[in-house]
Image: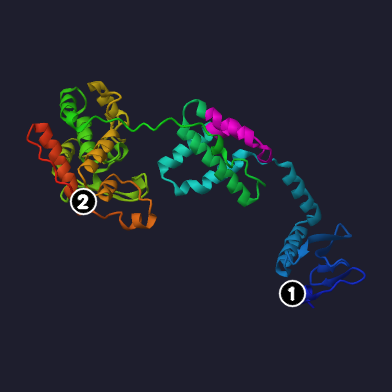
Amino acid sequence: MALTDTAARTAKPREKLYRLTDAAGLCLEVTPSGSKLWRFRYRFGGKAKMMGLGAYPAVTLAKARERREDARRLLADGIDPTTHKQEEKRAQAAHVHTFEELAREWYAYNSPRWAPATAAKALQYLEGDILSVIGQRPLQEITRPELVALVRKVETRGALNVAGKVRQWLSQIFRYGLAKGSVVSNPATDLDVVAAIAPRTKHHPHVPLSEIPTLLAKLEASKCDPMTAMAVRLLLMTGVRPGELRHAPWEEIDLESATWTIPAVRMKARRPHIVPLPTQAVAVFLKLREMTGSYPIAFPGRNNRERPQSENTVNKALHQIGYEGRQTGHGFRHLLSTELNSRGYNRDWIERQLAHGDQDEIRDTYNHAHYLPQRRQMMQEWADSVEALCTGANVVAIRSVKS
C-alpha cells in the first residue's frame, strides 16, 4: 500500500533503523534518533543503489514523490540520478557569483517600474560607476571598505547627487541578494554615515521680475531661433519644467480649451499634470503651430524634426544675451514661485501648478487635478501682470488671495 502522510507523521523511532515503503522505490527511513529521511531505491548498471531525497517534514510526501519521478525520468534517459545530483552540486560550487550578475538581475527586476529616462540614467551610472569597479568581484568577498572607496571616487569628481544614488543602489542590490539568498549580509548599509558633506544647495538662478522686460527685449532683438524666444515666454507663463516643454507633442495641447495635459509617463513625479494656459500662452502656441504644427513635437530640433529641441538651447540663448549665471530655463519656475507666494496665493495652488509632490500621498492622489479653476485665474493674473510690466502700463498690485 502507498504511504500516507499520517503514517509518516506518526512513525516513531525504534532501537534499529527501519523503513516505511511508498511505491516505485520511494521509502521513508526512520532512524533511532528520530530523523525521518526520504530514500529512493533503484538499480543502475545492474547494481542496487539508494539516493537521498531530503528530510521529512521539510520535504513533504508529495514533494518526495515529485523528486522520485524526476529521478525516474533520468533513469529512463540512461542517467544515474545520484551521479547527476553530484555533478550539479560540483558545478554550482565551481561557479562564482559576481556582483554584476546580481546587479543586472536587480536592474531587470526594477527598471520596468521606472520612467524610461530614469531607467536609462540608472543603467548609465550603474555601468560607469559601479560595475566598472566591482562588477567582476565575487559577491561574498565584497567588503564595506571597498564600497566606501567606490563612493569616494564618485564624490571626488564633485558628483554628490550621483554618489547618493550609488549608495542607494548598492544597498538595494545587496538587499535584493539577501532576499534571494545570494548573500548572507549587506555590506552597503550605513554608507551615508561617511558621505561627503554636500555644499549648500544653489537654486536655479533667476533675475527679479523687474528685469524680465529687459530680458525678453534682448531675447527678441538677438539672433536666436524664434522658437527659443517662444519657449522662454512659455516657461515664464506656465511654470513647467524645460524638459516637459521640449518634449511636448501637439496632441497634449488643447488650445480651444486653453489646457495642456501632460501624461504621468512624462512627469517627474509620475502623475498626470494639467496646465491651464493664460491667453498670452495660447497666443504663443498659435504662432508656434504655424511653424511646427506639421510635426508631432511642438518644439522639434533644428537638424532632426523628429527629435525635440536640445536641452541646452534655452540656456545657451540666455547666456548669449548676457544672463549666464543669472537666469536659466528652470529658474523661471523659481521666479514664478517667489512672485506668487509673495502675492499671497494659496500655497496648494502654487505647488500644484509647479507639479510638486505632496508629502501626504493620499491627499496628493486625490488632488492631482484639483484647483484647476483657481490655478487658471491665478496664472491669467500672473501673465497679465507680466504683460503690463513689459508694455510699461501701470501694474496694479494683485489682491492677496488666501483661499
Distance of mark 2 from mark 1, alpha carbons?
72 Å
Q: Nearer the viewer, mark 2 or mark 1?
A: 2
- Is residue 140 located in the magenta-colored stretch of the structure? yes
- In terms of secondary structure, where does tag 2 sit? loop
Q: Nearer the viewer, residue 55 or 335?
A: 335
- Is residue 212 located in the magenta-colored stretch of the structure? no
What x and y, as percent, mark residue 343? 20, 43
Mark 2 / mark 1, whichever is N-terminal: 1
Residue ID at (41%, 43%):
116
140 horizontally vs 30: left or right: left
What x and y, as percent, mark residue 15? 92, 70
Mark 1 surroundings: few (<14), some (14-19) or many (≥20) residues within 10 A: few
Residue 265 visible to the viewer: yes
271 horizontally vs 64: left or right: left
Residue 280 visible to the viewer: no
Report the residue marked by disc 2.
402
What x and y, as percent, mark residue 348? 28, 50
Q: Nearer the viewer, residue 88 or 363?
A: 363
* Dot 1 amino acid type: Asp
- In terms of secondary structure, where does tag 1 sit? helix
In the rendered image, the residue lying farthest to the right is 15
Q: Nearer the viewer, residue 114 or 168?
A: 168
Mark 2 surroundings: few (<14), some (14-19) or many (≥20) residues within 10 A: few
232 horizontally vs 52: left or right: left
Magenta span: 129-154
Q: Main secondary structure of the magenta part?
A: helix
In the rendered image, the residue lying farthest to the left is 393
* Dot 2 amino acid type: Lys
Residue ID at (31%, 49%):
263
Q: Which mark is residue 5?
A: 1
Residue 315 vertical position relative to residue 99 in the rendered view, above or below: above
Residue ID at (21%, 27%):
225
